[in-house]
Image (cartoon, rainbow, N blue to C red):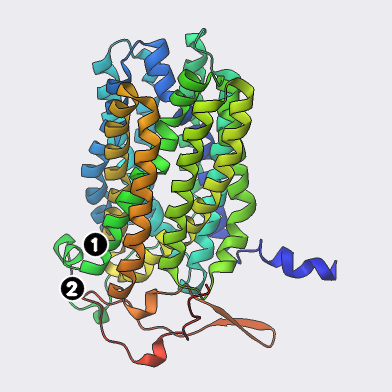
Amino acid sequence: MRPLAPLLRTFDPGLSRPVWLLQAGGLANMFGNGLVVPFLIIYLHTVRGVPLGIAGLVAATNALVALVSGPVAGALADRIGPRTTLTASLIGMAGAYSLFPLIREPWHALVLSGLAGAASGAFWPSQGALLTALTPRERRHAAFAQQRVTMNLGIGLGALVGGLIASADRPGSFTVLFLLDAATFLVFAVILRRVPDPQLRRSDADGGAGSFATVLRHRPFMGFVGLNVVVIAASIAPFSELFPVFAKTEANVSERGIGLVFFLNTLAVVVMQLPVARLVEGRRRMRALAATSALFGATWLAVLAIGLSLDGRTAAAAFALAFVVFAVGECLHGTVQGPMVSDLAPPHLLGRYMALSASSWQVAFILGPAIGGFVLQAQPFALWPLAAGACLTATAGALALERRLPVYVRRAPARVQTGETIEPAPVPAPAIASDPPRYHPSHAAPDRGASE
């Protein structure tokens, strides 16, 4: 076993029991999401007769309402604690999704999607704040990577099971999916009772009380948020919401085939995420984010080629391979995005920073499905080169943004071996400023050069 020890250590995130409990709840929750998300637009369009453009707007409505509720939840997480806010979010989503089988008209779907969005907007800032508060800085990249593992595992297993259950010829099969999804939210809420609820209070060193206006004036952070909008709107949003219906209608891929594509994608994330996080340690984060967007763009070009040339099971197999490449990009993104937000945020504003970071996802899930749904309706094969172009634009944007970021966040924390222990190098506390603060050169790790 000795030769395997270094390899096995890459899969050990070194996290505490409360963090593992939080991850277990996320696994159950994302299993439910995997049951529903890949098949939602198929349900609306093929079972309830909602036009594709309107179905895309239904998905966008969820994100639009979450865009409003997210900042409110971020402030609540700072005031009453992230665990309480997260629990309320989970109960709200359980109630909303349990009503989705009652949809008969497009407006029903819009209303219920809005209710679900109000609750889901509170999920990400409170969950992210709770994970950050439970994890020391030097292990946060591993914690967020592990979160991506558990959530992708849940989504992948859910999509695989959902593909076996869902059938457009049996509307009742979708009722099963929605009720199972609602149950998983409640399971997560029960698990949260065993997770500590740290209060994100201001210390004397934090200065003024702070507000959303303070966060909005932090220009490097807002630039990072804007970049994330482009990345997600051109990658994960169309993959989750639009690719399944494209694969079914244009390449004749069955629901089971679509479920298999999602399962293999998430399985690849599960296998690669922690080793990728270990690989990124000590390296420049924005280069990793640039590589993320490039891999996403390459995947969309492959989707275009497959859709034009293949059909049925052959197309499903080729799509599955393409989205393994996509999974590498997801692993890089999962290692960079959450920890960067945590490092830029002072403790007393962590919930607000997480809320604006979550808002970038919500904006992306508004723009991606809303624009992409109409493009897909008008010319299905035009969507993928447009998405690839947006991804390549984000690649250039990531490289340009790096010089505006504070020096201490440009690299992922590197663990330094000292005897039998691993100690993180000291870093300055996060600062809030409109421009990157000037740090002493000793705060920056040596530049590894262009070869990284």
Q: Nearer the viewer, residue 317 or 141?
A: 317
Check the picture and name the quadrant holding the N terminus.
Answer: bottom right
From the viewer's perspective, is residue 330 above or below residue 219?
above
Disc number placed over residue 126 in the picture, else none: none
Disc number placed over residue 434 in the picture, else none: 2
Which quadrant of the structure image shows residue 129? bottom left
List the residue tagged with mark 1. 222
Q: Secondary structure at mark 2?
A: loop
Task: Give the residue displayed 62% in from the left and 54% down from the top.
Answer: 272
State the image coordinates of residue 292 (x, y, percent, origin top left): 46, 56
Task: Give the residue displayed 48% in from the left and 76% down from the top.
Answer: 450
Horizontal arrangement in the rendering, residue 49 relative to residue 449 (left or right):
left
In the current view of this chain or complex, which residue is farthest to the left?
213
In the current view of this chain or complex, which residue is farthest to the top?
169
Q: Gap in Å between the C-alphas at discs 1 and 2?
A: 10 Å
Can residue 194 be seen? no
> Which amino acid is tagged 1?
Met
State the image coordinates of residue 208 (x, y, percent, origin top left): 16, 75
10 Å neighbourhood of mark 2: few (<14), some, or many (≥20)? some
Can residue 231 be seen? yes
State the image coordinates of residue 290 (x, y, percent, origin top left): 42, 60
10 Å neighbourhood of mark 1: few (<14), some, or many (≥20)? some
Task: Give the residue displayed 55% in from the left and 56% down from the top.
Answer: 146
Q: Nearer the viewer, residue 345 or 160?
A: 160
